[in-house]
Image: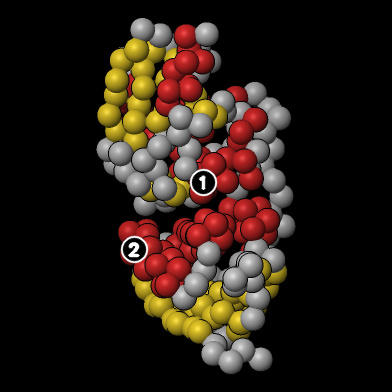
Amino acid sequence: MSDNPKSFEHVFVAEEFAAREALCTIMNRLVAMGLAEDQMGGAEIVLAEAVNNIVEHAYAGMEPGEIRLNARFEGPHLLLQIEDWGRALPDGELPEGQPADLTGPMDDLPEGGFGWFMIRTLSRDISYARTEGCNRLCLTFDLIPPGS
Amino acid sequence: MTLTTTAMDSGQIVTVTSPRIDAAIAIQFKEAMREHTVDGSGRVILDLSGVEFIDSSGLGAIVAAMKQLGAGRRLDLAGLTPTVDKVFRLTRMDSVFKLFPSLDEAMAADAG
């Protein structure tokens, strides 16, 4: 459909500082390819949470493996595919990502568990598949039409 | 992780000078907050105007910092940049913390 598909791949090690550096590189490339400034924040939050999950859970307790990101602009969408070769998601399914419960006393306030809720809220569409030891998370974002 | 502290009559201002509070430094941030606030008293204003990005680990570290201050001291947040503001509102943490657009406004609220 697209006359000029724009895409890139970025591979990095699933380690906290390498992930931070990779995120900065990826965001710069997305912006260079035309991601609008006011859409950057949402995409960066989702990417960061998805990558953190891989670093902290998929590769937990093992040698940090690779994370492979593919980004593609297609029509009015930005598609991000994130692959890793760590453990599968629990039950092989995407977590529900309920909003955190903030109703209790201060000492009971959650210090985590915000990630999947933000991923689900900020992306238009999300899918997960586990194939031959590979976790593949696909995320779709709506883009503001150019020139609008 | 770099924080700087400025004393006020009614408490202190802690300024975050790192551009990101993310998974890589969340634990250090919580510890640094403890070190900067443990000997103080009163309200703490956390100046986030230099922070461009925060993730859920960073958000959790700010919640932890509030808890370790104890019930007698408030932690208010000032100068949230767009992405940081988005994270706080999305997770409804804007109902837990008082968010001020700027440090000046946070300090003015202190006087009033």
Q: Nearer the viewer, residue B72 or A107?
A: B72
| In the displayed structure image, the side of residue A51 where residue A14 appears, left or right | left
- Under tag 1, what secondary structure? helix
- Return the x and y of residue A30 as percentages of the image width and height: 46, 71
- Return the x and y of residue A15 as percentages of the image width and height: 36, 63
Question: Is there CB contact under 8 Å for labels 2 and 1?
Answer: no
- Return the x and y of residue B76 as percentages of the image width and height: 49, 24
- Return the x and y of residue B92 as percentages of the image width and height: 65, 38
| In the displayed structure image, the side of residue B28 where residue B73 appears, left or right | right
Q: Badge 2 sits on which subunit? A: A
Q: Is residue A54 above or below residue B79?
A: below
Disc ID at residue A115: none
Quarter of the rendering occupied by the N terminus of chain B: top left
What residue is drawn where x is 51% and y is 40%? B60
Q: Nearer the viewer, residue A132 or B22?
A: B22
Q: Is residue A120 visible?
A: yes
The picture quadrant where one finds residue A13 is: bottom left
- Under tag 2, what secondary structure? helix
What residue is drawn where x is 35% and y is 47%? B19
Residue behind mark 2: A21
What residue is drawn where x is 41% and y is 78%? A10
Q: Is residue B81 above or below residue A40?
A: above
Identify residue type, mark 1: Pro
Residue behind mark 1: B82
